[in-house]
Image (spheres, grey):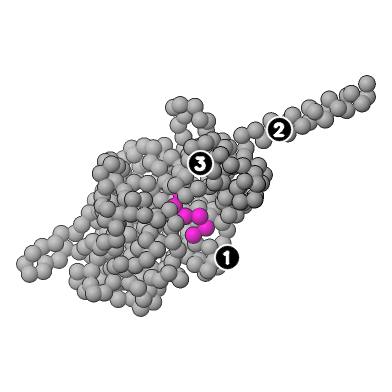
Amino acid sequence: MKRKTRILALVSGLMAVAVMFIGCTVDAHDPAKTGQEQGGQDQTSKKNLIEVPGAHNLAVKFGVIGTEPGAETTKADVKKTLEKIHEYLENYPDAEGIKLGDYIELPELNVSGHPGDEGKIDGLSKAHVLVVGINSFKNPINGTDTASHLVFQFEDALVARTMGVEDTPYSYIGSEMQTYLRKKFVPALGNAGVTSDYLWAPRRAIAAQFNSESPTFIADDTVWLPTEREIFGDRSYSVNAAETTTNQARLEYYATAESRKKGLSATPTTFVKYWLASPAGPPATPDNVGACAVSEDGLATAALVFEVVIVDISFPVEPLGFAPAFCIK
C-alpha cells in the first residue's frame, strides 16, 4: 500500500509539472521542427513563450492574451508583454524565440502636436510596432556592453509633418522633430502601455550636418528616427565620413525594398515617403540640403527641409510620414 501511494504521488507530481509547462515552449525557427531538428538545440527548454503556429503577436506568444477570435490587447497587456520580454531577454539574451517582424499591438495612441499641432495623432487604434532588430546596438556598435534588447519601429508611417528646422544647414539634432519625439511621443507611448520601465536609449552615431567629418553621438533618446544606414545598411545620400558601417547599427528586418515600404496610418495601403534622421551629404549645399528619406518604393532618397528659392522656383518644405523607433531591454 505504501509503495502504491508513492507511485501515485510521483505520477501526480509529474502531471503537475506537465500542466505548468503546457503551451510554454518556443518555436525559434520552424513550427514543424522541434528539439534537435532545429540547429541541435533543444527548443523544449525555452520557457515563457507559447507556441502558436503562425502567430506573431508577442502578447499571444507570451501568453498575455489568448488566441480566441476578437481577443484584443489592452494597455495593461502591452505593459505585461514588455515585462515578459524583459524577463525572457534576461534568460535568453540571443532572443532565439523572437522573430523579426513579430509585433506588439498598441490599443490606442494619442500624441499632442508640436508645434501648431503638427504631428497630432488622435485616437489611432491597433497600431503595430514591429521587431526590426535584435541586439542591434550591442558592443561594439554601442561602444559599451549592454543588456540584450529588441528594436521596435512602427509598421506604418504616422501622420505627415515637417522636420521643423529653420536654420541652415539642416541637423536632426535639436530639430523640432527630435524635440517632439522626446517631449510628446515618449509620454504618449507610456499612455499606450510602452512605459519607461523597459525603454532603453542606445548610443547612436549621426552626422551633425551635411559636411560633418566625424560622428556626433546621441545617447539619451529613447524614441528616435533611424538613420539611412540603420535602415539600408549602406549609404546613398548620408554623410559617409560621419555615418559608417562601423559606428552604426543595421536593423536587419529591412532587407528588401518591399520591407521598407510604409503607408500612412490613415491609408496604410498607399505607400508614402517617410523621414530618416540622417542629413543628406555632399554634393548638397548648406542652403538646400535636406534629410535622407525612404521613398514610396522603399528606396533611398532625400527630401528638402527648408523653403528655398532656386532660379525663382519655390521648393516648399516637404511634410513626410515618420515612423519612430525605440528599444526594449
Q: Nearer the viewer, mark 1 or mark 3?
A: 3
Query: Callout 2, which amino acid?
Result: Ala
| Mark 1 Cα-neighbour bin, 10 Å: few <14, some 14–19, many ≥20 | few
Residue at 55% of width from left, 40% of height from top?
A: 31
Q: Main secondary structure of the magenta part?
A: strand
Q: Amino acid at mark 1?
A: Asp
Instruction: Quadrant for residue 287, please give it.
Output: bottom left
Residue, disc 3? 58
Q: CA distance from mark 2 to mark 3?
A: 23 Å
Query: Is 225 one of the magenta-colored residues?
Result: no
Instruction: Say which quadrant the N terminus sits in.
Output: top right
Q: Position of residue 20 (x, y in %)?
A: 68, 33
Of callouts 1 and 3, which one flags the residue occurring earlier in the amino acid sequence?
3
Q: Position of residue 62 (x, y in %)?
A: 56, 39
Q: Considering only vertical position in the picture, is 72 above or below 92?
A: above
Distance of label 1 from label 3 (alpha carbons)? 26 Å
Q: Is residue 56 visible?
A: yes
- Give neighbour class at mark 2: few <14, some 14-19, many 20+ (Cα, 10 Å): few
Q: Secondary structure at mark 2?
A: helix
User: Which one is nearer the viewer's eye here, 166 or 216?
Assistant: 216
- Distance between mark 2 and mark 1 Cα atoms: 38 Å
Residue 19 position in % (x across, y down)? 69, 30
Q: Earlier in the sequence, mark 2 or mark 3?
A: 2
Q: Look at mark 2 in the image and give the residue it sits on.
A: 18
Residue depicted at x 14% and y 62%: 315
* Residue at image mark 1: 145
Q: Residue furthest top?
A: 1
Relative to 132, 86 lies left or right: right
Say whether residue 7 is left or right of residue 319.
right
Q: Please say if 108 is above or below 314.
A: above
What is the magenta range? 131-136
